[in-house]
Amino acid sequence: MAEADLRGATRDFGGLINRTPRRVVRPGCAEEIAALVRNEEKRVRVDVVARGCGHSCRGESLTEGIAVDMRGMARVHEVRGDRVIVEAGATWREVLEATRPRGLVPPVLTDYLDLTVGGTLSAAGIGGASHIHGTQAANVFELEAVTPTGEVVTCSPWHRSQLFDALRSGMGRHGIITRATLRLVAAPENVLSCRVRYASATELLAAQGRITADHISGQVKSSGFEFKAVVYDVRSPPQGLAPIDVEELTFEEFADRMRPDVEKLIEVGEWDRPHPWGQVIVPADRAVELIEATLAETSPADIGLSGVILIKRFSPGPVPMLRAPSDAVLFAFLRTASPGCSTAARMTVANDRLYDRAEALGGVPYPPVPIPTRSK
């Protein structure tokens, strides 16, 4: 197992926490991770933390123990029928590149494709198609993982089902996911993206629950609440929708729609600034109350120059560790501590208020609160 560079593992995308790991290793297979965990058992108790692309925002992928660089395990294996076997360090972009030529895609993709499969399955993975297909974690046939005692195991809904449920959205507390068998569906050729503007959160959430579309998303803009409804391989907007504009895209263009924005953020320096993201999941029937109360105390400076506020109605599917209601709303403040805006510390305090308010309404933080994997 190769030793890797320490420098990249001291900071994550959030930029709020810095930790220097004792070691960074890049394994090539699950057995190497298992041997590492077993060896640590014989020594002092130490964190063993998996790290994919380091896109966590609250230090979940950081440790002062041993950082396991999962990008050494990024192979996409066999695409067969309705499934593909992938290593946990593969990104969703790499999965898509392997499945799309065969006319297949995962039913739920992340908005940003350069996240690892293991990372998003450990958090649950909410996407624009989650109102139909559930989270990414709900679309897994089988997992391979290394347990905290250094055992390599496979699990599924029918074999070691308790472990299977504990790993999905478990934030690494019950083991390190090393391989996943993912569900695939037929890939569309083209999409029609329809943008609608609403005056209130009530109207936006009603539309997200009413309109038949393959992909939905919502944002809070200075002009109001914006709803995007995307339909696959059709030429007309969904029934009951009056869009202010319509855009036709290939599926590849749509799936990778964030690339130009990310490139621009990198160019102007916003990508490397601290990102105090605050995200919660609340029951749909309490979401408007949370949204209105939080927005009333939020100014543009509290979000940052490139910050985004998302509202996304979804169904989580059978993922017990997520602790989400069957009809749920993701309310996300993707803040950036830009120059001239609120500080990262003040944004973090605002996020704490959001978590407290959501909890009082029966909500939970997203991603789930992490507990690092440890050798025991």
Image: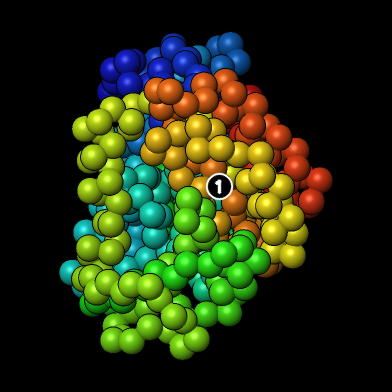
Answer with left or right where residue 309 lies relative to residue 269.
right
Nearest to the observer: residue 313 or residue 106: 313
Number of marks in the rendered image:
1
Secondary structure of residue under mark 1: strand
Quadrant of the frame with the N terminus: top left
Quadrant of the frame with the C terminus: top right
Image x and y of residue 262, in percent = 28, 42
Q: Give the image quarter of residue 355.
A: top right
- Residue under the image location 40 percent in, 55 percent down: 110
- Residue under the image location 68 percent in, 32 percent down: 352
Residue 87 in sight from this viewpoint? no
Which residue occupies the extreme left position in the image? 101
Image x and y of residue 362, in percent = 78, 52
Amino acid type at image mark 1:
Ala
Above or below 293: residue 252? below
Which residue occupies the extreme right position in the image? 360
Task: For label 1, count other residues whose C-alpha is less than 10 Å away and answer few (under 14), some (14-19) or many (20+).
Answer: many
- Residue under the image location 27 percent in, 46 percent down: 261
Nearest to the observer: residue 256 or residue 28: 256
Answer with left or right where residue 227 lies relative to residue 296.
left
- Check disc 1 and report the residue beneath it: 332
Image x and y of residue 250, in percent = 21, 71
Residue 197 in sight from this viewpoint? yes
Answer with left or right where residue 189 lies relative to residue 156.
left
The image's colouring method is rainbow
- Residue under the image location 58 percent in, 79 percent down: 210
Q: Give the image quarter of residue 148.
A: top right
Above or below 10: residue 116? below
Above or below 233: residue 326? above
Image x and y of residue 275, in percent = 46, 31
Answer with left or right where residue 24 lies relative to residue 201.
left
